[in-house]
Amino acid sequence: MGLEGQVAWITGSSSGNGRAIAERYAREGAAVLCSDIRADPDPRGYDEGPPTHELITAAGGRAVYVNCNVADQQQVDDAVATCIAEFGRLDIHVANAGIAPLVHDLVDEEFADYERLIDINQHGVWRTCRAAARHMIAQGEGGRIIALSSIAGMTGIDAGADYVMSKHAVMGLVRVLARQVGPHSITVNSINPGYVRTVMNRESLDDPARTALLQSQGSLPRLGEPADVAGAAYFLASDDAAWVTGIALPVDGGYTAR
């Protein structure tokens, strides 16, 4: 129960990594504000069962859900207000919400598609991290901010230019925000997952040949699970990471060790 008494706000909490992080935090004693564009898990992914907040409360934890599109500033502000109204404070924020479109070359990208992705993956992280940081500073008791980047934020992987750009931007935000809010005892870090079994990677993972190729590019004999990312998110939120800030933590089975 390493997060007993803490309150965490997680975006993109209905599926994949966000769902796993929310469940892990709740098991560790945190109250969780779950937010996403839908309460139910994405039917295109691997998650089954009730909404995340219902899973948590059924297991005896504390959680509520609020609809929040991170591309909408008002919905972001409303999510923070709900967190305070329900739980009285905000200690941990995980900026997890994001999208990954079909991979194509820059010369074939449509600007409207680029704009939409950047507004969610880059501007959305900026909006929620800013909102969380503002409240944590006013609260005056420190805090933890964790943003989900990707191995695409560390390398030039085979992905759309828009996606790779957005994930590099997240790492830049993490580094400068860590410097800015450090005097308030707020840590800011990113988690950079590799190929994890989530809806974003389902098309690749449903192809045995593609799965074998991706697995061969890592160091460990398997691809990732959301629980792997949740473990890293727990560490960065815990007291064990009290002096860790401004880092990018790869959770990629050794992909970036090549």
Image: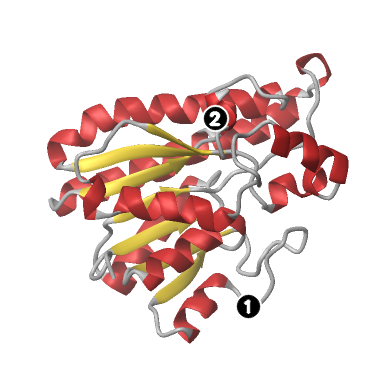
Question: For the view shown, which residue lies furthest in the top direction?
Answer: 107
Does residue 128 show up? yes
Q: Which circle's residue, 1 or 2, is located before the other in the chain?
A: 1
The disc at residue 50 is 1
Picture coordinates of residue 1, whole percent (x, y): 29, 71
CA distance separating discs 1 and 2: 30 Å
Give the residue drawn at x 54%, y 30%: 167
**In this view, 217 is above or below 184:** above
Q: Indicate the position of residue 228 as horizontal and vertical percent values.
A: 51, 53
Q: Which mark is residue 178?
A: none
Position above or below: 35 against 175:
below
Q: Residues within 10 Å of mark 1 (few under 14, many from 20)?
A: few
Q: Residue at x 28, y 65 (%)?
A: 3
Q: Secondary structure at mark 1?
A: loop
Where is residue 236 drawn, in percent x and y?
33, 48
Q: Position of residue 27 (x, y in %)?
A: 39, 72
Query: At x 55% / y 71%, what residue is drawn?
Result: 52
**Residue 75 in sight here:** no
Q: Quadrant of residue 253?
A: top right
What's the image's color scheme? secondary structure
Give the vertical position of 86 relative to 129 (above or below): below
Q: Is residue 137 left or right of residue 152?
A: left
Q: Which residue is mark 2?
A: 167
Q: Give 217 or 25, whichever is nearer the viewer.
A: 217
Q: Quadrant of the C terminus?
A: top right
In which image quadrant can residue 49 be found? bottom right
Amino acid carrying mark 2 in the image: Lys
Residue at 27%, 32% in the rendered image: 178
Q: Type of residue at label 1?
A: Pro
Secondary structure of the residue carrying numbered label 2: helix
Is residue 93 found left or right of 194 in the rendered image?
A: left
